[in-house]
Image: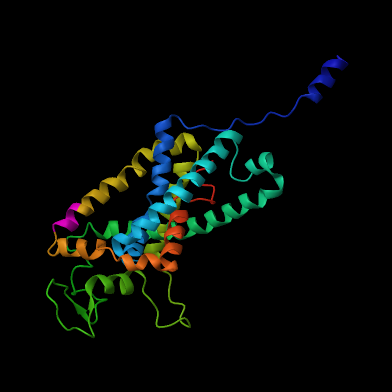
Amino acid sequence: MLNEQCAQKELPPEVEERGHWGSKVEFLLAVAGNVVGFGNVWRFPYLCYKNGGGAFLVPYLVFVVTCGVPLFLLETTMGQYTQEGGITCWRKLCPLAEGIGFGGQLILFYSCMTYIIILSWALLYFVFSFSSQLPWASCNNYWNTGCMQITFQWANRTNSTSAATEFWERRVLAISGGIEEVGSIRWEVLLCLIVMWIICYFCIWKGVKSTGKVVYFTASFPYVMLVILLIRGLTLPGALEGVIFYLLPEPSRLTDPQVWMEAGAQIFFSYSVGVVCVQR
């Protein structure tokens, strides 16, 4: 009897088994959804236009091969080898470097706080899109002041703003006159923010089991929307001139160190290297 009690005391505590992806497809979709995000859709075209058009692709591809893909594979390998999270994996590899995991979590925390606001704005725009007349397409609203209907013909309207800009600044954000004016709470935005946090919670509340099912939509939907926006953009007047102006290479920019720095920064931003997103 005594031996049985001693044996029970010596048994190691049960460790909850770590969740696993249901299939390789779920993992690949999760990675694809992480790489193709809001930041990449907005940031990459801007950097490409700013840093020499098509010439920017040269340093970008160089950093993809030399930095992006190797570090991405290294981080995923660490997660698969240790079967641990972004912090606890360092306890097996190098306990002295555990602070790297905490630093990555801190970066991820700030990123989530930023992107959830953007998602709440997107949800608010989605709700407004069900109006019979789009509020950002006309100047006949109570928040409009020096509004002007935008057309494809150039005109001198120095003191005018577009309907979309006024809807964004005066209706959605209600920007105050200065930093000394706090302004009022935007209850519509707050409600959308709460809804987005609830959606995010239910997407991850069962770990990779629930996340693996959600990524089938969240990873594929952005690609569908990008294709739709591409088709829509190519059908607009002056689309060909815009594409040529955007991608026309400027070889002289390749000697600018700033172009290479921004290409490298974009790679780390795109692949989420160092923020333990793909390591879990």
Q: Is residue 39 visible?
A: no
Residue at the limit of the structure toward the top, as seen here: 1
Q: Residue at x 37, y 49 (%)?
A: 36
Count of numbered tags: 0
**Could you tell whether 163 is left or right of 79 in the image?**
left
Q: Nearer the viewer, residue 22 or 66?
A: 66
Tell me which corner region of the image, top left, top right, bottom left or bottom right, holds residue 163: bottom left
Q: Nearer the viewer, residue 238 or 70?
A: 70
Residue under the image location 37 percent in, 64 percent down:
254
Residue 55 x, y percent position in the rendering: 32, 61
- Quarter in which the C terminus is drawn: top right
Looking at this view, name the residue that lies furthest to the bottom.
159
Q: Which residues are magenta?
A: 231-235
User: Which secondary structure dominates the residues rendered in magenta?
Assistant: helix
Q: Does residue 73 sit above or below 45 in this rendering?
A: above
Residue 128 place in picture, x, y as percent: 26, 60
Question: Could you say which is closer to the camera, residue 267 or residue 21?
Answer: 267
Residue 72 locus on image (x, y percent): 49, 45
In the rendered image, the residue lying farthest to the right is 2
Q: Left or right: 150 with respect to 108?
A: left
Instruction: Say whether residue 136 is magenta.
Output: no
**Residue occupying the point 49% across, 36% down:** 208
- Residue 231 on image: x %, y %: 18, 52
Left or right, 61 with reference to 99: left
Q: In this orientation, does residue 179 appear?
A: yes
In the image, is residue 2 above or below residue 130? Answer: above
Q: Quadrant for residue 217, please give it.
A: top left
Relative to residue 99, is residue 140 depicted above or below? below
